[in-house]
Image: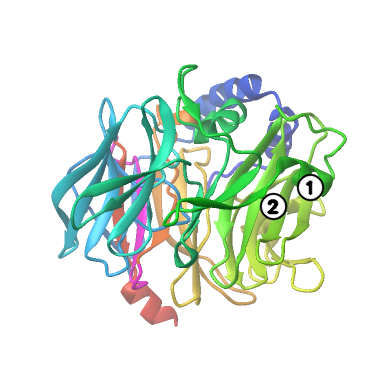
Amino acid sequence: MNDFNKFEKKVSELIKRHLFFHQFIKYIYQYFLYFLNKEKNNLTINKLSKLINISKESLFYGYYDHTPFSKDMKLFVSHNHNDNLKLKLFRFDENILKDAVTIIESKYYNYQTGLRPIWIDSKNIIFNYVKNNTLISGLYNVENKSIIDLKYPVQEVSSLKNILFSIDYKKLENINRDYGYNLSKKNKQEFVNGILAYDYKKQKILFNLKLEKIIKNSKNKNLVNTNDYEINHIHHCPYSESIVFIFRNRKIGANDELFFYNYKTDIIKLIYSGKLISHYCWIEKDKIFAYMQYNNINGFYEISFKNKISITQEILPNVSFNNNDGHPSLSPNKKWIVFDTYPNKARKSSLYLIKNQMNTKKILLGTFYSPMKYYGYKRCDLHPRWSPDGKFISFDSVHEGTRKTYLMDIAKLIKKYE
């Protein structure tokens, strides 16, 4: 595979704080490399896997940390993208999406998360949208097709505790528009300072982890201007009343940081501060699997923070095969991790499966071509997500020339390698 070398990644890292310059140079360079490295085949699939084209529509779900399937796997939610964005609900039957129902249509969205739809249970979906010029969230009931408006937009949920976690999306958009909603000056949002927890059933604020408290525990405190920070990628722990989130600052010399916050005990911990932290998933109660830089080496590492913070690289110890950023997700039975890569020099993204154990080996599920028109803000990351039964991987791809959602049946492959 024609991956980017250490020198190319280092140059990219040095200029990434200058966002426009960084994106412009990367685009020109990748366009040039594509013509030098382009390949004939747009698609390769592992022989033990089966690629399923579940719909003729142009669909994408969005982020990797939640699944488009309802918990009983009878329903499937995704975005249909034409001029505006439509959030649609489908019946999932015999590996095909049927009987589409439009939940909401919106001109305010992004290509990374769409409207951020998350299943609360098999009957309710939460998502973001703009109503009366205000960014809010809605709770959609699939049985009576009703929407209950909630005053705060959602970033993450704890469905068992009826909590939605909200951030300041207008500020996030100014720092990182990839996750904003293209809001205009007339659009507004209920004020959020830091991270706010809101009981969406009782419709009351439970707590507010304020920016000032985060800065107090940050190693960037001397560099932070309130207009320069980014709070993003909140993930709720499946095992406890806690969250992990990324805190970034765009100033030169600032570190990427990862925080742990137990909202039951009100304990906040800085568990990583360094040059790079991107995507991660929980693999144990006090351990995550994350792509980051440690000892000047980029790769997937395990961060443990039960009693003390320790960083190891035991799952993928082979550095030469562990240097591509991607989005990891843990299987429902906790035995497997799926992750993708960004496009290489030939504009090919890869999908990998590994066991959640020490010294595992990567299993290539497939490679997918991404045309240059899907670059930067409009990129289509694969964002692999597990089905609740652990037999399918859902992902988005543009290898056919349009943004679509696919399934990969990996039941036979898992059976062979278990």
Does the magenta segment cover residue 290? no
Disc 1 is placed on an element classified as: strand
Count of numbered circles in the view: 2
| SS for dot 2 | strand
Marks 2 & 1, CB-CB < 8 Å contact: yes
Residue lying farthest right?
Answer: 222
Reading the image, the residue beneath label 1 is: 274
Quick one: which residue is furthest to the top in this view? 185
Residue located beneath label 2 in the image: 292
| Inter-mark Cα distance, 2 to 1 | 8 Å
Residue 411 is left or right of residue 226, and the answer is: left
Q: Which of 268 and 20 is in front in this view?
A: 268
Residue 66: horizontal and vertical position, in percent? 43, 57
Residue type at tag 2: Met
Residue 393 among those drawn in magenta: yes
Q: In which quarter of the image is residue 174?
A: top right
264 sits left or right of 186 in the view? right
Q: Give the range drawn in magenta.
A: 388-401
The mark that comes first in sequence, 2 or 1, is: 1
